[in-house]
Image (cartoon, helix red, strand yellow):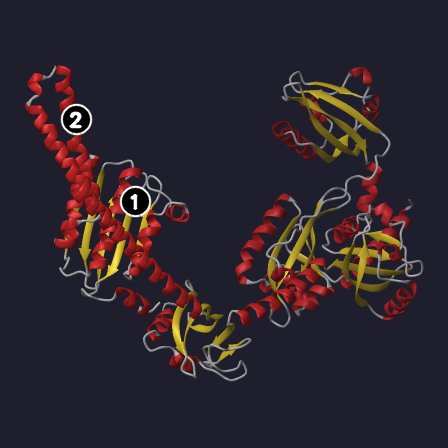
Amino acid sequence: MTGNTTVGVLSVTENLFQVVADVAPVLVWMSGPDKLCTFFNKGWLDFTGRPIESELGNGWANGVHPDDLQACLDTYSSAFDRRDPFKMEYRLRRHDGEYRWMLDAGVALFSTDGAFAGYIGSCVDITERRHAEDALRRKEMELSESQRLAGVGSWTWDKDTDTVQWSEELYHITGRDPQLGAVSYKDHGTLYSEESWMQLQRAVEEALRTGASYELDLEMIRADGTRIWVTARGEVQCDSTGRIVGLRGTVQDITERKQRENALALFRSLIDGSNDALEVIDPTTLRFLDVNDKACRDLGYSREELLSLTVLDVDAAMDPPAMKTLAAKCRKDFVVFESVHRRKNGSTFPVEVTMRPLTLDRAYNVAVARDITERKRTEEELRDSEERLRLAAEAGKMFAYTWDAATDQILRSGDSYLLGVDAATPFTGRQLLENVHSDDRHLLVSAFDRLTPDTPLFQVSYRMIRPDGEVVWVERNSRAYFDADGRVLRIIGMAADITQRKRGEEALSSISRRLIQAQEAERARIARDLHDDIGQRLALMAVTVEQLTHVRSHTSDEGRSLLDSLQTQTAEISGSVQAIAHELHSSRLQHLGVVAAMKGFCAELSTQQKVEVDFGYADVLPGLPAETSLCLFRVLQEALHNAVRHSGVRQFEVQLRGTADALQLTVRDTGLGFDPDNAIDGRGLGLTSMNERLKLVGGELLIKSRPNRGTTIVARVPRLPAGTDLVGASANLPL
């Protein structure tokens, strides 16, 4: 190539880059070796609405969202210092003040002599995709070498002996005499430039450590001092046991290819770094003249295959007349249209194409094809989701709402059956509060008062009185939004009619109560049978055995031993039957009250199980409702039995404490502990039974436990006077 030809190629390349940069529907930037930006294309300036003087240097950073700026600068600086390519996402302020999400991809630039020249990058607006999906795959893969060039030398290396063997061609590539033998690995630094030798060392160390193959472009120094570029490939070799014993690979002279690549490096860096498919098309034949990596990946062809095809070969929706019409429009200005592209395997995908005419040494059409599969799918899913939400809201008597703090207006979607007014009728927060049942109004006010920027979510259930006088239960799940001073701006959420659910819960509570009452009646019957029947028989047996002991002088030693054993067993069985009868139905609870019953139970359990139970009480007023006393007693029994069986310790603490409005039972141990969620969700009925019993008296169960950290179970019931109808009381408690 002559000097004039080289200048002409570079001029065309620079012009082509300038034009493509300005017509490409992406934001393009460049920076120098000092990290300061030196170029922004027209697309960038149109987007930000700022003159280029305001963007140069670090001025572009003024448009980055404050929350994203530091991470953006860190990513850029870190990659810059390592000369690594990078991708990052951040929000950039558009000319109308709106922040838009950008995917910024940058790569290092090097001059033809290998000197670092700065970075070039492009930004794509991904706001719509960002909103549709939380994350998109951005990583791009380079196309592997499509064919092997001639002049490839091979080599092997034994790492234990540092023995290297070269093929004849490799001696030719390096310019070294085969009679001198191959250069050992430890002396390989003489074959490469300093930077390339460091690259090769890192790759070899990684291969020996992980077994990964490598492929590097390196600058080699031949025996005569000339420098060439080679592609070095290597893979590990293992012995029969799988141990890595060395490497083998090839070295390929790519000097001519490297020279060609350097001539087009700037242009190729731009188009191959793009997140959209870029295509240069002959306006007359519609043949592809050049394509970027993204186009190859999208269509499933190699670059060489695509350059042998036309637009009509890959566009499933385009015919010659339609293409002729588009070409005519494109001659005047750029055109944007949607179409369908066909991959090599026959599958198709929707695209949005931007095509613009370009004239340099000849006429070109430059097209940018963006895969909009995800956008189309998201749009379809959004339509389906909105329809499902509408149907669900109608079926479930729900509606979505937005409350504006400034106007007090509530905007509703769909049918507002709960409010008794249609969605178009104005309705305010004050009107809503007036329609809330007077006993429940404080619940809504308290939920609102608890809202902060750190706790913006709330759920509240309350009763509402419709205009026709009907009382309905409503459940609201909402989120509040705040201004910079922490004041509520608006609240959005869903309101649902849960009247039927509440009625079901009340019915279930009544059934649970009757079941527990039946259980307690059966416990009492069994306890009476044990005491009056089995207990009496055992007592009679004990008397009989005792009488036998008086005549044992006439029996043998073996007979006397058997009588002693029988007497001991009879006494133990009798004691066990009495203990079971007391657990099933405590006479102390019925006649002496909950404190005495609990104290006695703890003492009996201590004796039976040979454990230590520390029982204490304070401020327990007499006259507790029978159901409350029985509930707490059963919870104590269940909790202590569980602790003895599962905690792995022999000491336990029980406290019964009264407060102004509640009575609280605490059972604590320092044993093995457990996961409360797994225990409640498991097959055991103990915790479930305690929960259900407490619900019937308006109480609650709290469990604090972690593996190897002990367990604390707290049963808390409201303090109600004796004789209170607990079923009715629990049904009327505000939720």
Amino acid type, mark 2: Leu
Query: Which residue, as the protein is rendered here, is positioned at the far right?
Result: 284
Q: Relative to 515, say whether 224 is above or below.
A: above
Residue 438: x percent and y percent? Answer: 33, 78
Mark 1 touches mark 2? (CB < 8 Å): no
Q: Quadrant of residue 622?
A: bottom left
Q: What residue do we see at 14% from left, 61% from top?
A: 623
The Cα–Cα distance between marks 1 and 2, rounded to whole angstroms, is 41 Å
> Looking at the picture, how far across and down is residue 209, in whole percent?
61, 28
Q: Is residue 409 left or right of residue 264?
A: left
Q: Earlier in the sequence, mark 1 or mark 2?
A: 2
* For residue 305, above or below residue 556: below
**Label 2 residue SS:** helix
Residue at image coords 20%, 59%: 626
Image height of 490 relative to 698, above or below: below
- In-front residue for pair 108/610: 610
Q: Nearer the viewer, residue 178 or 235?
A: 235
Look at the image and tell me in which quarter the C terminus lies: bottom left
| Disc number placed over residue 566 in the picture, else none | 2
Dot 1 falls on a residue whose secondary structure is strand
Query: Percent from the top left, x then y, of residue 352?
Result: 76, 62
Question: Is residue 317 shown to the viewer in this render?
Answer: yes
Label 2: few (<14), some or many (≥20) within 10 Å?
Answer: some
Q: Name the residue carrying label 1.
A: 711
Horizontal placement of 266 versus 378: left or right?
right
Alpha-carbon neighbours of circle 1 within 10 Å: few (<14), some, or many (≥20)?
many
Residue type, mark 1 in image = Thr
How far across and down, in percent of the image, does residue 636 sit? 24, 48
Identify the image quadrant of the N terminus: top right
In front: label 1 or label 2? 2
Q: From this viewpoint, is residue 605 visible?
A: no
